[in-house]
Image (cartoon, grey):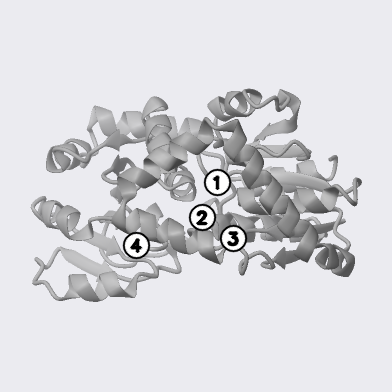
Amino acid sequence: MRILIASLPIGTGHDIAAKALAEACLKLGMEVEFSEHLVGKARIETGLYFWALKYIPRQYGYIFRWGDHSPLQWAKHRQRWMRIGQEILNHVYDLYEPDIILATHPFALNAWAGVKEIHSHLKLVGVLTDLSVHRFWYEPLADAYTVWLPEQVEDLARFGVKKEQVWQTGIPIRSSFHEPAWELPLYAKDPIVLLGGGLGMGPYYRILRKLAEADYPVVAVCGHNERLRWHLDQYSWPDVVTIVGYVEKMPLLLHHSRLVVGKPGGVTAAEVAQSHVPFILTHWIPGQEEANRDRLLLHDMAVRGDKDLLKWVRNILPEESPLRRKIIHHQELWARPHAASDIANRLLNL
């Protein structure tokens, strides 16, 4: 069985999920290839996305929600990406002859649907990396979707997707999160970990200044954002504060964490839930991460700490804290550490 995994570099979660899927499929003896052939075509959307998040985040959130409720806008968007797919992906299909396309980004799903119009036997699977389903994920030619929460099954049902087409497997995360390396902590014993996704997004200085008041070890992970790391290094922080860049051994760091503070990216939420460490949400991308926030709160896997952060930290830090135990209990209920291998096994019967 030949699997082609298609994604786009808009955020890091899509790529992390793609790598986790590749690992799981290879273990089952499948042939796996990655397709990055749409990167050039998505350059404008990628640039506009990051520009909007930086300069007009509130307006971006409005546009995101408007697109979710606009069938006409969805139809135009789908037709454009299907046309792009037919223009540049047919030769990719001829080169790899895949049996199944795993799309971890909606643009990739629509583009490969354009190829499926010509090669009808090709199977398409949309792999969602958030906790809700935006209308742009809807692709009538998709054979299946993978989601985390039951609400997402209902999200897809509103577009007419049959429930048997929706696999409630969870978000694919690295196998190292369920096969932890039992080593000593990386930086400090049971630190508070500040996360802003792989790109280090958010008001780190304001949050870190507040966390430093707790007089407890804090590790601020800046991800690939070296500019942010340099900026934070210019300040004089208490000895309890450690500033780091991208962390290769994130499973190890989270396993040894006391508390995670940050934004609710879908993959981050899945990794934190599997690590069974309380999650305080302090900031989020308008639109998709607002929905992630609300569903994490709904399932008691996190608390909202954009106000009174220090109060929440001091409430959750103690081992005997009832709130701490409640969050960890619900994370244990909802964690799906084997999502990638579950998806790979289902592909065999697609």
Q: Which mark is residue 8?
A: 3
Q: Is residue 138 left or right of residue 148?
A: right
The kind of residue on which mark 2 rests is: Gly
Q: What is the three-letter code of the residue carrying label 3?
A: Leu
Considering only order in the chain, which callout, 2 or 1, is on the residue closer to the N terminus? Answer: 2
> Mark 2 sits on what residue?
13
Percent coordinates x, y for residue 295 in the rendering: 43, 31
Q: CA distance from mark 4 to mark 3?
A: 18 Å
Residue at which label 4 appears: 200
Kindly report the distance in space between the C-alpha atoms of the residues bearing marks 3 and 2: 10 Å
Q: Is residue 16 visible?
A: yes
Q: Amino acid at mark 1?
A: Thr
| First reached walking from the N terminus: tag 4 or tag 1 | 1
Dot 1 or dot 3: first in sequence order is: 3
Q: Are marks 1 and 2 in contact (CB under 8 Å)?
A: yes
Task: Read off the residue under disc 1.
Answer: 129
Disc number for residue 19: none
Q: Residue at (38%, 42%) from the top-left corner?
A: 61
The earlier-in-sequence mark between 3 and 2 is 3
- Rendering coords of residue 316 (x, y %): 22, 38
Q: Which quarter of the rendering shows the N terminus?
A: bottom right
Which image quarter holds the C terminus? top right
